[in-house]
Amino acid sequence: MFDAGVKDSKAYSFLGTNNYNAGQEAAVKMGELTGGQGEVAILTQPWQQNHAERTRGFSETIKQRYPGMKIVDVVDDQGDTQVSRSLALQLLKTYPQLAGIFVTEAAGGIGAGEAVKSAKPDKPPSIIAFDTDKGTLDMIKDGTIAATMAQGTWNMGYWSLQYLFHLHHGLTVPAPSSSGRVSPLPVRVDTGISVVTPDNVDDYYAK
């Protein structure tokens, strides 16, 4: 299985993003963008496990590493661009000194970007989004979004197929499993995260 797990799955292996680590990476980037100072808000889907993990990784890292930063609000954007736009406009009104917005999913990043473009604050907050849809990449290119977190989707597909090939042809070597039983494949594989900025955004457009 890759990308999203299923409870009580009997799959040999799961390949996907370590979402807690992705949140940590986003926090480090936010610290860099803001100089480790200021108020930060999060747009997320708190009822969904992968987004909750991203939020937790981000929040805990901010608290542990950046004493000059404060998370002032965490709001549910419902994975909807218009909802996130409305929420981000309200955040900008409530927190006029807002230094950053972390968005844990793609639609919300675009909504937050549209809100900042519309509100035109004197000092726009740094926005960190998630995933590499074209709308997000375009906003990185024009400077509206500072960065986005790119998942290793190619690795998910490639290594899933390789694992299937090795299982089918009996080429696997047993590896320890989380249950203590011997598994023919690694039980969990972190397919990685990378940070997309204006410096490397062109590499992420579909060719």
Image (cartoon, rainbow, N blue to C red):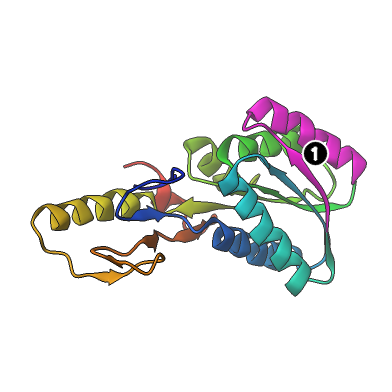
Kindly identify which residue carries mark 1.
Answer: 120
Whether residue 146 is visible to the viewer of this picture, yes or no, is no
Give percent across and percent down for residue 147.
59, 53
For the residue labelled by badge 1, is the local secondary structure a helix, a strand or a loop?
A: loop
Q: Closer to the camera, 9 or 45?
A: 9
Q: Closer to the camera, 125 or 164?
A: 164
Occupied quadrant, residue 79: top right
Give percent across and percent down for residue 115.
74, 34
Q: Compared to 188, does 120 lie above or below?
A: above
Q: Residue at x 47, y 59 (%)?
A: 193
Q: Tag 1: residue type?
A: Lys
Q: Residues within 10 Å of mark 1 (few under 14, many from 20)?
A: few
Magenta-drawn segment: 71-95
Q: Residue at x 29, y 48 (%)?
A: 157
Give percent across and percent down for residue 114.
69, 33
Judge left or right: residue 123 versus residue 6. Answer: right
Judge left or right: residue 120 versus residue 83. Answer: right
Whether residue 192 is visible to the viewer of this picture, yes or no, is yes
Q: Residue at x 46, y 55 (%)?
A: 17
